[in-house]
Image (cartoon, grey):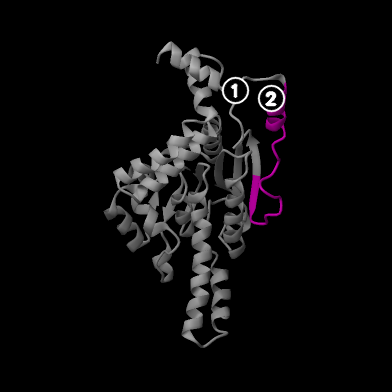
Amino acid sequence: MSLSRLNTLMKLAPKPTAIGSLQMQRNLSALPESGPTGHFKTLAVSSPKPFVFHVELHRPSKFNAISKQMWLEIKECFDGLATNPDCRAIVLSAAGKHFTAGIDLNDMMNLGQTLAETDDYARKGVIMERMIKVYQDSISSLEHCPKPVITAVHKACIGAGVDLITAADIRYCTEDAFFQVKEVDIGMAADVGTLQRLPKAVGSQSLARELCFTGRKFEAAEAHSSGLVSRLFPDKESLLTGALAVAELIASKSPVAVKTTKESLVYSLEHTNQEGLDHILLLNKLNLLSEDFAQAVAAQLTKDDKPVFAKL
């Protein structure tokens, strides 16, 4: 890059002021102790590091079985974090012995009672459609969230848990973790994301179909070799430490760059290469005019301290 180009970039980059620096320090030190709200009953939300949020499934006595309330709270939580300027990366883990035992079957019993209130099959169908859509939207809230989501899985991740983690951006697990697409064993087809996302996550239609048709367990080593998870950790403590460290690294980057990167990656999964290129062209013709780009390039060229990016 020419000296004239560097000078231009330096001029574009906002000059730090005493007031601006003080305001940024206040913003960083004023991170909330909990997530979007503190009222969740099935989730525990915290901010252990600047711009990093930790969301924990929190029904340990039920092995984090996903109840109707948890479905609703997952969507509310991730929708809130999606627009929270203090959040740039999210770690999703679980309390207790297992990551999740899957869908709460007690809720299915309650659904049967609701369906029994009408004899009309069309109306039964409407009830089912609305319920499935609520659950689908809950899982998809991870994918739709513009902030990268890292799932940290320990021990069992069954049924709806596979739906949940395949909607995330990065998946890690402990060496004793195991996974199971359990829906066929309770007489149903998975309907909130696994059948759509698991084949793409593992890159093998054959393996994905085997797992979904048989409902068999697959251990951490197989999940790692197939690409479902990208890193293994010896225990839950090291898993969380590692996931939070990656989240902290992501959070140090330009929020404009990270948001745009995720948006392009998600879009490109369902489109041709050329459509993906056209999409990122539309995004970057504006985003390359951002102060983040000028600051980051100037810092790289001058070997200055890492740039501090404004909230987004």
Which label number is shown at residue 34? none
Residue 16 within the magenta-colored segment of the rendering: no
For the residue pair 225 and 32, the one nearer the viewer reads as: 32
Establish if 296 lies above or below 199.
above
For the residue pair 171 and 62, the one nearer the viewer reads as: 171
For the residue pair 167 and 207, the one nearer the viewer reads as: 167
Residue 217 shows up from this direction: no
Query: Residue placed at 45% from the left, 41% from the top?
Result: 262
Q: Which of the 4 quarters of the picture holds residue 193? A: bottom left
The residue labelled by disc 1 is: 14
Residue 144 placement (x, y as % from top left): 50, 50
Residue 127 placement (x, y as % from top left): 52, 76
Element assignment for label 1: loop
Query: Residue placed at 35% from the left, 51% from the top?
Result: 270
**Mark 1 → mark 2, Cα distance in angstroms:** 10 Å
For the residue pair 91 and 207, the one nearer the viewer reads as: 91
The reply to whether discs 1 and 2 touch (Cβ–Cβ < 8 Å) is yes
Establish if 268 lies above or below 114.
above
Residue 249 placement (x, y as % from top left): 53, 30
Q: Residue furthest left?
A: 206
The residue labelled by disc 2 is: 20
Residue 206 placement (x, y as % from top left): 27, 54
Query: Residue placed at 53% from the left, 17% from the top?
Result: 10
Indicate the amino acid at tag 1.
Answer: Pro
Q: Which residues are magenta?
A: 19-45
**In the image, which is nearer the foreground, mark 1 or mark 2?**
1
Q: Residue furthest top?
A: 3
Residue 33 within the magenta-colored segment of the rendering: yes
Residue 51 shows up from this direction: yes
Count residues near mark 2 (Cα–Cα under 10 Å), then give few for <14, some for 14-19, many for 20+: few
Indicate the amino acid at tag 2.
Answer: Gly
Query: Residue placed at 61% from the left, 55% from the top?
Result: 76
